[in-house]
Amino acid sequence: MRFYIDFEATQPENEIIAIGAVAENGATFHTLVKPQLSSISKWVSDLTHISAEDLEKAPTIDETLIAFDSWMMSQESDIMKCRFIAYGDDSKFVKSTLPAITNDHAFTCAAILMAKIEDCYDATRKFFHGTIKLVHAFNYVQSVETEQKHNPLEDAMMLQKVYEYTQTHEPLPAHPLNKNFSEIVDYKSPSGTFYCCGTGKKAKERSFASCEDAIDWLIKDVMRAKEPETIHRDRIMKNIMKAVRTKKAYCSLKWRRVKEEEVK
């Protein structure tokens, strides 16, 4: 079972002050955590709307992790079947909070989280063709306009929607924040295997399973774009196809295409 998890923490100590989680079946867990090693700053308090007074009344990290483990086991009793999905390297928050843990049961739970938390940020970034905040990804997949409140449970629930969407849909042709996105999404990438090579006599040919793979390579390794989400992928596709038809070089490379029916 997948558990989507998010933390809020003190800065710069990264000690956990709130945990939010949602299981794939919709069950939720949410609590504040009383810090033992640090205190909440005004900046974090303003960001999360959590006050020092709120935290003073909250359970300790030992109590929290024991409660979390009990909740988790009520959803899935086999720990080997549990996956913990986060948006970023959230294991660092667990690691930074370890010195505050005094209970063996709680420590075991923390160790499991550290070992099993999966960072889905890179996969999400690839899906959206560039850096994207969780709330922006959520707004796109849900077709809404909401603001992130940095409530860990709300963030975990947003993450669930984003993760499930990216696992069941094809990657976008361009970053949704690209001002030309509405134009770009209409283009259809041609099928087939694509090949390119330099113009020199000893140049080696490179193959791509799809036109999209070729475009990704051009943007990253040839153009070395600092802001790849702003690149017009549709224009690159058209230039590749023009190079295939005219036998002329594009990006100093000769291109050819083998259609799917020719491969079979």
Image: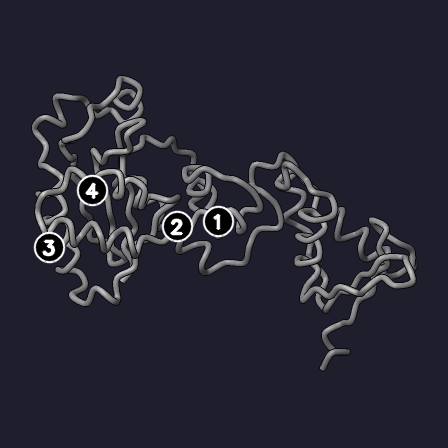
Residue 155 % position (x, y): 32, 40
Kind of residue at disc 3: Ser
Q: What residue sits 44% from the left and 59% below the top?
A: 167
Q: Which residue is mark 2?
A: 119
Say if mark 2 contacts mark 1, CB within 8 Å: yes
For the residues carrying marks 1 and 4, which lies nearer the camera in this image? 4
Question: What is the spatial separation of the Cα atoms under label 4 and label 2, in whole angstroms?
Answer: 20 Å
Query: What residue is pinned by disc 4?
Result: 98
Q: Nearer the viewer, mark 4 or mark 3?
A: 4
How many residues crowd around disc 4 within 10 Å: few (fewer than 14), some, or many (20 or more)?
some
Tell me how far mark 4 sits from mark 3, CA to CA: 19 Å
Please give the residue where the numbered disc 1 appears in the rendered image: 122
Q: Quadrant of the C terminus?
A: bottom right
Specify the quadrant of the image occupied by residue 70. bottom left
Q: Amino acid at mark 4?
A: Leu
Return the mark for residue 70.
Answer: 3
Regarding mark 1 in the picture, which secondary structure is present there? helix
Marks 3 and 1: CB-CB under 8 Å? no
Quadrant of image for the N terminus = bottom left
Q: Residue at x 21, y 64 (%)?
A: 79
In the image, residue 16 lies at what x, y percent? 22, 36
Helix, strand or loop for disc 4: helix
Structure colour scheme = one colour
What distance separates the C-alpha of mark 3 from that of mark 2? 23 Å
Secondary structure at numbered mark 2: strand
Using the image, determine if residue 112 lies above or below residue 29. Answer: below
47 or 196, nearer to the observer = 196
